[in-house]
Image (spheres, rainbow, N blue to C red):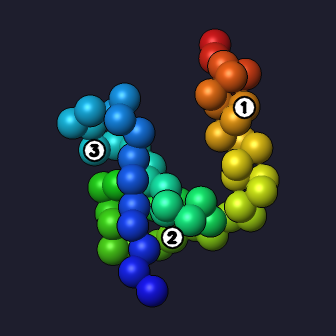
Amino acid sequence: MTVTWRKSTSSGANTSCVEVANSLDAVRDSKNPSGPVLSVDRAEFTAFLADVKSGRFDG
């Protein structure tokens, strides 16, 4: 299976960010796409993304 990766549209040309698999079960460093991949629990990651979008972690 081919994994499609995406990064935030707000990152623009910045390469210092993470990319998320479209399946929402993995993340990786955009600067090192052939490097290690962190597998995550999809439900927990979806909840984390909802918290980010709600502004919960804004300083």
Horizontal placement of 25 versus 8: left or right?
A: right
Identify the disc placed on residue 1: none
**What residue is pinned by disc 3?**
15
Q: Callout 2 environment at 10 Å: few (<14), some (14 to 19), or many (20+)?
A: some
Q: Residue furthest bottom?
A: 1
Q: Residue at x 44, y 49 (%)?
A: 18
* Residue behind mark 2: 37
Percent across and percent down for residue 51 are 72, 31
Q: Amino acid at mark 1?
A: Asp
The answer to whether residue 29 shows anywhere in this view is no
Is label 1 or label 2 in front?
Answer: 1
Whole-angstrom CA distance, mark 3 to mark 2, is: 16 Å
x, y percentage for residue 55? 66, 19
Residue beneath label 1, please? 51
Q: Earlier in the sequence, mark 1 or mark 2?
A: 2
Q: Amino acid at mark 2?
A: Val
Q: Residue at x 74, y 64 (%)?
A: 41
- The residue lying toward the viewer, choosing from 32 and 43, is 43
SS of the residue under disc 3: loop
Quarter in which the N terminus is drawn: bottom left
Name the amino acid type tagged 3: Thr
Q: Is residue 21 visible?
A: yes
Residue occupying image coordinates x 42% and y 74%: 3
